[in-house]
């Protein structure tokens, strides 16, 4: 399912033809503009199932070759004698190599990773590489796993770009070699390149010196790629390209954009989802110094001011009467009660192997468990924001842009303009965790609606305050799981029945056609529908109730809940079978060598089975998401007051070829830490339809004093690289819950686990004794 | 008129005296290295120094900061700061980077006051700074390494 999630074949952002802003530059050398070519390097890494769309995309690309100009990124002007062999690379006479990243840098290290691929094949020096974000242009910058859609998500950036970016680098290299061959009148194969310098005998030339001449070389269509054993950068620890600017406060995020005459907007949102403005009085707000305008938009009232503080003060002075006749008014408790009720009946079938019901009757013993998961906010540290500037015929935005094509389509529809008239400047995102890839373009449309309401007379920066970010929705949905398993007399599972209840993330989005099949949203069941354990009879079914609370993918999506249910339940079965949890899993993962490799590695490195002091426990979990395999061993200490700490986490990961081992390590540390917040404290709850949390004092997240020591081990692999942004996140919750069981002898079925209860403590005393 | 001394430069600002220093610094003066995260001193992204002490500028009205020396990430220039920033780079601490100005301001102030912080000292000084990317392990390692480089 994870696999399918990465390859929605039928995204409905169809027919995006995005002509470049510099379409007047046609193929060839134009005076004063260097070389501009529209070389299409896409389509090289697509799964075979996508061949039909690939053919269509290639046709579109061929048509585009004559009109699409590369190097639009950031809207920079191509300088004299700069060399642009393709849409991803620009080499200047100053010897700088600019790599255009089609993916958003939101912390996961993609700017560094994608640049590494280019630098590798180009034989560039790492120091001469500079990265900038691509503009919105689904034709050249589409995610190859998503068809004609540009966006970042599903841990696909490295996986879909691995060959594409290397080919881009190799093509540029061949053209530089061709230029040197011409200049020195020597065969191309007698020229060497190392660290950005071409040489032949005593002759030397830098990329910059050859840039102009290289621009006149033919563009190779099949430049040769290195064999993996020739890699000199891939697999090594290269420093991040974004470190310096982020350490000195110079990196630019959406929050930092200031355009001439720009107004800042803060919005009063309805207190309940589905609420609408009935009437409002802005007299006091308008009297405030700094406030320029107050406008009604579809989902609230916006105060526009010369600065953020004045806008906020103005917003707080509004008097609004809300029409809540169709607002959502239930609380989390009532929703849970409904879900429990639903779980009593069969849902849409997500998987059926054998006859689980029949096999259950034959089992020597059976076990049942039910799990509860709350809504979760993404709570990126940079709250949602977006800058919009309108002209008579275009809309330009500045955004930590995670779903270019979706936002482009949404804005085009709002303003009734062609998609190519929507210009997107992709800036760094101060975290996202999925939030900035909103398939409904929620906050982007909100910003645009404000700009529209003032007729575009000033550029607008929408700023969500933390309270807006916490309460205005798009949460990881609440879920309820019910599992029953039957073991034979040897403790081997013969039947596994698994029912999931929770809102569909995909329903009503352009991803619906590809990701909902036979009434099953693949993202609700991934991690269970592809249960790796050998069980002859399996049934998985799903209820997707429709509730008016906006939901969205949250780092690792379905695995955020499925990994917890599966990995704590299998642990429970291991104990029931009187077997070691690692051995038990190993036996049942007989057809999944990548699972067992990480499981074994994590267990070994953590000293699985070695004694721990009283009050301490150890737990393990293994899970695959987005083609990456992660096992974690958590060590916990339970204190007498019921509080507990997670002291140490050992991570083993198999993500194919490790392009940058230090970034992989960072994502394992951080992805685990992100998941740990949802174990120890985070939850969004509703009462009478109102979200009960508002800021970091009540939507609590992991802090320094709660961070465990982390140890990361990477499996050496020759498989193509898979993503690392998400797969560490879902594994920590079951590892911790299993470790808490190891101390207390009690199981945990509800997240978050804020404390160990008194009953469980009593059990711990007995267990330890 | 409010007068603020930011990074050694005086600024005369026509703003209300209840405006938090954060917004005066970012929106009026135009120094955007200091970040907004929560507006209620819960996340530490807005940390700046007033007379060398780390404070949360999102809840500090400009009236309180008048007549004092305000240092932001753009003006950081002590030996502790240089050690912290170069170690941060060396260990590639940052991910999204949005909280890191605040983290670096807090870490610099910690090392200025306590050249050899223990793990507990680091917890006490740094637990007010949230990092949603959870770079905490590297922040801890970087503080220790910066302390060693200063010793």
Image (tube, coloured by chain):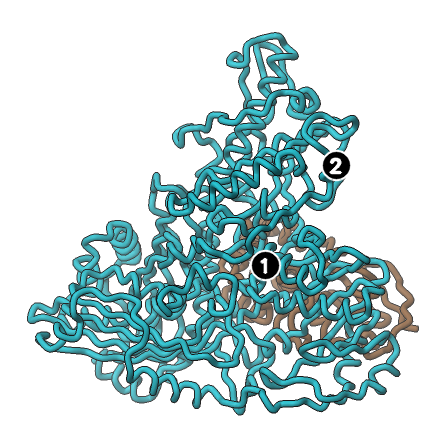
Chain colours: A cyan, B brown
Q: Nearer the viewer, residue A478 or B69?
A: A478
Residue A264 lies, in percent from the top left, at 78, 69
Residue drawn at point x = 30 percent, y = 67 percent: A350
**Residue A91 visible, this orientation:** no
Q: In 3D space, how far apart are the residues under numbered discs 1 and 2 (Cα atoms)?
A: 26 Å
**Residue A358 visible, this orientation:** yes
* Vertical order, A182 against A517 (above or below): above
Q: Quadrant of the N terminus of chain B?
A: bottom right
For residue A499, the mark is none
Which residue is tagged 2?
A24
Toward the top, the furthest residue is A185
SS at badge 2: loop
Residue A565 lies, in percent from the top left, at 31, 72
Residue drawn at point x = 28 percent, y = 79 percent: A346
Q: Is residue A557 left or right of residue B148?
A: left
SS at badge 1: helix
Q: Earlier in the sequence, mark 1 or mark 2?
A: 2
Residue A348, image quadrant = bottom left
Which residue is tagged 1?
A406
Q: Is the same chain shared between marks 1 and 2? A: yes
Residue drawn at point x = 44 percent, y = 41 percent: A45
Q: Is residue A667 left or right of residue B109?
A: left
Q: Nearer the viewer, residue A604 or A319?
A: A319
Q: Name the chain under label 2.
A: A
Residue B102 lies, in percent from the top left, at 65, 63
Residue drawn at point x = 24 percent, y = 50 percent: A593
How would you rate the neighbour count of disc 1 (Cα within 10 Å): few for under 14, some for 14-19, many for 20 or more? many
Pair 1/2: label in front? 2
């Amino acid at each position: 399912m994870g696999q399918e999630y990465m390859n929605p074949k039928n995204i409905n952002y169809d027919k995006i033809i995005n002509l470049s802003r510099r379409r007047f530059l046609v193929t060839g050398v134009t005076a004063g503009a260097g070389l501009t070519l529209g070389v299409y390097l896409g389509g090289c890494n697509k799964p075979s199932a996508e061949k039909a769309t690939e053919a269509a995309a290639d046709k579109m690309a061929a048509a585009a070759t004559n009109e699409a100009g590369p190097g639009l990124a950031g809207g920079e002007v191509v300088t004299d004698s700069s060399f642009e062999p393709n849409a991803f690379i620009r080499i200047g006479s100053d010897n700088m190599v600019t790599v255009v990243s089609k993916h958003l840098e939101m912390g996961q290290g993609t700017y560094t990773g994608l640049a590494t691929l280019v630098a590798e094949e180009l034989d560039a020096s790492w120091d001469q590489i500079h990265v900038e974000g691509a503009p919105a242009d689904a034709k050249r910058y589409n995610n190859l796993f998503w068809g004609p859609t540009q966006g970042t998500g599903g841990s696909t950036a490295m996986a879909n770009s691995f060959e594409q970016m290397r080919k881009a680098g190799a093509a540029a290299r061949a053209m530089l070699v061709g230029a040197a061959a011409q200049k020195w009148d020597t065969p191309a194969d007698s020229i060497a390149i190392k660290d950005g310098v071409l040489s032949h005998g005593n002759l030397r030339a830098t990329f910059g010196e050859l840039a102009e001449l290289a621009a006149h070389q033919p563009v190779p269509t099949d430049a040769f790629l290195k064999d993996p054993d020739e890699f000199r950068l891939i697999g090594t620890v290269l420093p991040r390209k974004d470190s310096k600017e982020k350490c000195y406060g110079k990196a630019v995020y959406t929050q930092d954009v200031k355009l001439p005459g720009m107004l800042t907007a803060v919005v009063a949102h309805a207190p309940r989802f589905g609420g609408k403005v009935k009437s409002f009085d802005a007299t006091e707000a308008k009297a405030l110094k700094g406030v320029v305008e107050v406008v009604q938009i579809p989902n609230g009232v916006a105060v526009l001011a010369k600065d953020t503080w004045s806008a906020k003060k103005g917003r707080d002075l509004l008097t609004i009467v809300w029409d809540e006749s169709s607002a959502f008014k239930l609380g989390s408790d009532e929703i849970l009660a409904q879900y429990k009720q639903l779980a009593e009946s069969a849902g849409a079938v997500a998987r059926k192997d054998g006859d689980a019901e029949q096999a259950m009757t034959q089992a020597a013993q059976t076990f049942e468990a039910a799990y509860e998961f709350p809504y979760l906010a993404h709570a990126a540290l940079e709250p949602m924001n977006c800058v919009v500037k309108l002209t008579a015929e275009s809309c330009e935005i500045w955004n930590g842009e995670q779903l270019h094509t979706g936002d482009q389509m949404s804005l085009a529809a709002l303003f009734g303009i062609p998609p190519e008239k929507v210009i997107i400047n992709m800036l760094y995102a101060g975290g996202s965790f999925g939030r900035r890839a909103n398939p409904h373009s929620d906050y982007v449309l909100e910003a645009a609606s404000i700009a529209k309401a003032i007729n575009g007379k000033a550029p607008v920066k929408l700023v969500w305050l933390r309270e807006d970010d916490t309460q205005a929705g798009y949460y990881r949905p609440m879920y309820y799981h019910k599992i029953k398993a039957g073991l034979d007399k040897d403790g081997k599972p013969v039947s596994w029945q698994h029912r999931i209840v929770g809102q569909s993330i995909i329903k009503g989005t352009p991803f619906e056609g590809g990701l909902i099949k036979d009434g099953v949203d693949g993202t609700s069941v991934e991690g269970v529908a592809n249960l790796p354990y050998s069980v002859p009879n399996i049934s998985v079914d799903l209820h997707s109730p429709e509730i008016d609370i906006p939901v969205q993918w949250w780092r690792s999506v379905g695995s955020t809940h499925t990994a917890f249910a599966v990995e704590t339940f299998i642990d429970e079965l291991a104990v029931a079978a009187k077997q070691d949890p690692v051995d038990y899993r190993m036996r049942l993962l007989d057809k999944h060598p990548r699972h067992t490799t990480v499981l074994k590695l994590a267990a070994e490195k953590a000293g699985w089975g070695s004694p721990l002091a009283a009050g301490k426990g150890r737990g393990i979990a293994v899970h695959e998401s987005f083609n990456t395999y992660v096992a974690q061993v958590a060590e916990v200490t339970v204190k007498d007051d019921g509080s507990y700490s997670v002291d140490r986490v050992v991570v083993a990961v198999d993500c194919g070829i490790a392009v940058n081992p230090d970034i992989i390590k960072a994502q394992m540390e951080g992805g685990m830490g992100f998941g740990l917040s949802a174990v120890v404290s985070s939850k969004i709850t509703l009462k009478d339809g109102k979200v009960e949390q508002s800021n970091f004092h009540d939507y609590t997240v992991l802090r320094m004093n709660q961070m465990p020591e982390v140890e990361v081990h990477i499996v050496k692999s020759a498989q193509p690289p898979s993503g690392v942004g998400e797969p560490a996140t879902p594994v920590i919750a079951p590892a911790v819950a299993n470790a808490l069981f190891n101390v207390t002898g009690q199981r945990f079925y509800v997240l978050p686990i804020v404390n160990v209860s008194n009953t469980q403590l009593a059990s711990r005393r007995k267990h330890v004794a | 008129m409010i007068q603020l001394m930011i990074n050694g430069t005086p600024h005369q600002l026509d703003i209300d005296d209840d405006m938090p220093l954060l917004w005066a610094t970012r929106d009026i003066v135009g120094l955007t290295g200091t970040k907004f995260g929560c507006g209620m001193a819960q996340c530490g992204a807005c940390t700046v120094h007033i007379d060398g002490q780390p404070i949360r500028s999102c809840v500090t009205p400009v009236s309180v900061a008048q007549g004092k020396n305000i240092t932001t990430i753009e003006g950081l220039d002590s030996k502790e700061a240089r050690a912290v920033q170069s170690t941060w780079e060396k260990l590639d601490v940052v991910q999204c980077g949005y909280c890191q100005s605040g983290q670096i301001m807090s870490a610099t102030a910690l090392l200025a006051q306590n050249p050899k912080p223990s793990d507990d000292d680091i917890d006490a000084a740094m637990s007010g700074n949230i990092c949603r990317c959870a770079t905490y392990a590297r922040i801890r390692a970087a503080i220790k390494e910066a302390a060693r480089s200063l010793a």
